[in-house]
Amino acid sequence: VFVIHTPAALAWKPATHVYLAEQALEDAKDGKVTIERVDYQEGKVIGTIGEYPVDPDMLSAISRYTSQYKAGVLGPDAYPDIATGQQVIHPDTNSDGSDGWLKYLWRESRSGSPAVKAFAAGYLTHAAGDMYGHTFVNKFTEKAFTFTPPSNAIKHVLLESYIDKLVPRPEFNASIEGLKDFIYQKMIYASPGSDLDRKYLRAGGKGTEASIPRIYSTLRARLQQNIDSYYKRKSEYDRQYDEKIEAAKDCEPLDFSCSATALYAQAAAIQAERTAFIATVGAATTYQEYWRDDIDEGLRKWPETSHEIAKALFFNPEDKTNVSDAQEILEDYLNQHLLSMSGAPDVVGDFAGVVDKVQDALEEEIKPIKKLKENFYSFILEQATGMTLEELKKYLQNPALYFDEVMTQGEGERVNRETFHSKYWANTSKPNTSKDYEELVKKFEELHFLEKIPALYNTVVMSKLILLSPSSINQLLEDLKDSTRLKEQNVMLGFIRTLDGDNEWSGKGEKPHPEKMVLAQTCAAYRQIFMKQPGEKSEDGCSPSERFLLSFSTATQVIDKVVDDFERELAREETELQNLNTWIDQSLQMALSAEATKGTIDSLVEAYSTKMSGAEVRLCKSGRQSIAFFPKIRGTVASTQRMLAGYQPWKTLGRQHEQIISSLENLTNEAISTLDQEQTLTRIPKSCSALDTLPKVYSLRTQGIDISDTSKKLGDVTADFRNQIENLEKEVERNKQFVNNQRVIASIQADLAERILEGQTNEALELANSAPVRINRMIEEAKGQNIFGNDEISQLQD
Ligand SMILES: [Zn+2]
């Protein structure tokens, strides 16, 4: 219950956080991540910058310990606990702000196990999500999460919950196996003098009033101090006693300045004092030792408890805010640990007389505990959020119902659900039924909403970059023609003041600061890989020369893409050409067969009509010849039919291909009718003794089945093919020329960019002056060739 107030400012809700991290992970699985080139203004992916290898250590950690990585992605919403995360880690509470925490965890994880490394990478990924998520959400709330006005807090809760309902579900498999000790040592137990104690979770530090780790670390330190001073004083008595005894022993018999009796008496007095001291303070000390041990035990159980609470409140496959489960977990913790950690020892009986006295002496340290035990609800929940538990639950569970009422009022951009969808959620319409939600979530993946909602897109890009080594980040910077280099150990380190803030990558948020993310040092680099997102404050962030370079590299990329497309088209046309040639060969063969058949039949008919008996021999010969042709014809027909079946995809290309296919179909039909005639001719007996089959052949001819006509048609189709091939070859040539033109344009642009970057102003100017003339000439030629549409031409002119 103590921690329930804080689902308030989660930016992305935990499931959204994890879903986005899964996208980065998916890309990283094969050992490298793809960084795309975007049109910053339009929010579109337009190409690829490159593929960058994931740091090998990182890769093995996140692939083997994905669940621990995901626990990290829950980040300060869950560990060390939501209250500490919310009040100490998210806001700017130490001299280095949230960055201090990120650096600290990163540094401490370096000597840890792969599970710990995966967790730290996840924690940084949470920060990336908060950075872009809060920039988006704060636009509608005007400010970072705050309790005053209460409408700010409500808007945060509502919008973040609503977004969570539109995003696909991740796999809910976060785990802290192998992390508990790390979380306890580095995030919970602020041992005196440690970094955690001195800096990040400082006693009396901002936001620590509600931090269980801090409250009990402080109390433990005080108990340890008392325990230590007891043992110190006791050993001091021992030392003094021993001193007196030794001195007494050393007294020489005749040395009257040395009185053994007196020294023994003094020793006895010390001994008595010691006994009295032990009697009064010893029991209290033992009590405090038990108490201290109970705190240690309880704090060690805290990571697990926090993990269970996070799951109950916001990371379960049922998508429920299980407040009663969370309460139960806390009540168990209260009974099993918190009470004894608060001074009600597990071991009872001996301490009846000392408990009150010891607790009175620890008044300062116990004060926050008393408050905490007195009234969880009103102290933490209602006073802190301005909302009752019921209110909070309704906004978390049913954001759509209250959306229009809440989001069209108060500070920040006012937006109703309809406008939110059309303007900020990939131009969708608002869902109403649960089926609508299902549809929308399905569309999210099918229609690549990630590339259409810049705040989500940017989160994923940043999550990928977190997985890269500094040298890969520097390679990327080089590829973006940026001379900045990463000095930190990770791209997510060194700049973020607060996880609650907006525009933290550029330092232009609610609380401006000079530190920037390495890729945001120059706006030209940033705008090649991140999209402009709602809530971003960088309209005038680019200097004129940066803007020029940026539009330049975008144009170059567009040209590269056009060239790529043309090259693919060329390759396809060349394949078509080859196929067409094969076809023509086959057609010619068929035409030849048909010609030969025609000749044979003609001579048969001629022989019959002259009725010359001497021709009988010739007839038989011709008949056999003609029969020999038929298998060839049959073969040709079969292969033509195969071709027709095989070239079905061609039909989608339209234009002349349809004609070709229909010609071939006709041709096949004719060949088949030729084969029908074969049926007749094969009846010519091999001995040629019965010439009475000849009249049938003759009647075929008189019935109008004229093979010479088929042969003629074959010749026409062949000629037609030849023409088409010629045209196609010409077109391929023109396309090749066109592609070459684009290559030249691209290389002129690259030259120009190179010179500008290297500061060769005169050369750049000269080139810039001459380039348009050359480019325009090429474009005019392309227009003249009349191959491409106006859209393509105007794209190139741009
Ligand atoms: Zn967060």
Image (cartoon, helix red, strand yellow):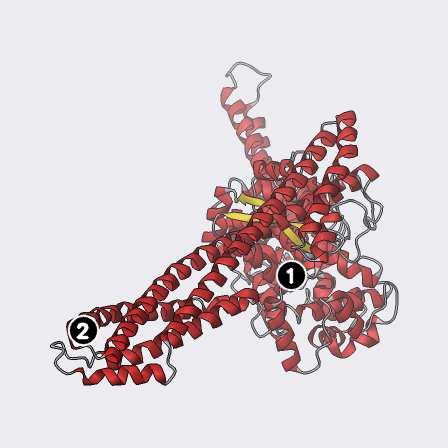
Residue 596 at x, y = what percent?
30, 67
Beta carbon of the mark 1 residue lies under 8 A of ligand 1 = no
Tell me which amino acid carries mark 2.
Answer: Ala
Q: Earlier in the sequence, mark 2 or mark 1?
A: 1
- Which residue is painted at 35% across and 79% down in the image? 673
Q: Nearer the viewer, mark 2 or mark 1?
A: 2
Mark 2 residue element: helix
**Residue 788 in view:** yes
Q: Identify residue for label 2.
A: 615
Residue nearer the viewer, 720 or 117: 720
Q: Quadrant of residue 153?
A: bottom right
Q: Quadrant of residue 405?
A: bottom right
Q: Residues within 10 Å of mark 1 (few under 14, many from 20)?
A: some
Q: Identify residue for label 1.
A: 450
- Above or below, 399 relative to 6: below
Image quadrant occupied by the N terminus: bottom right
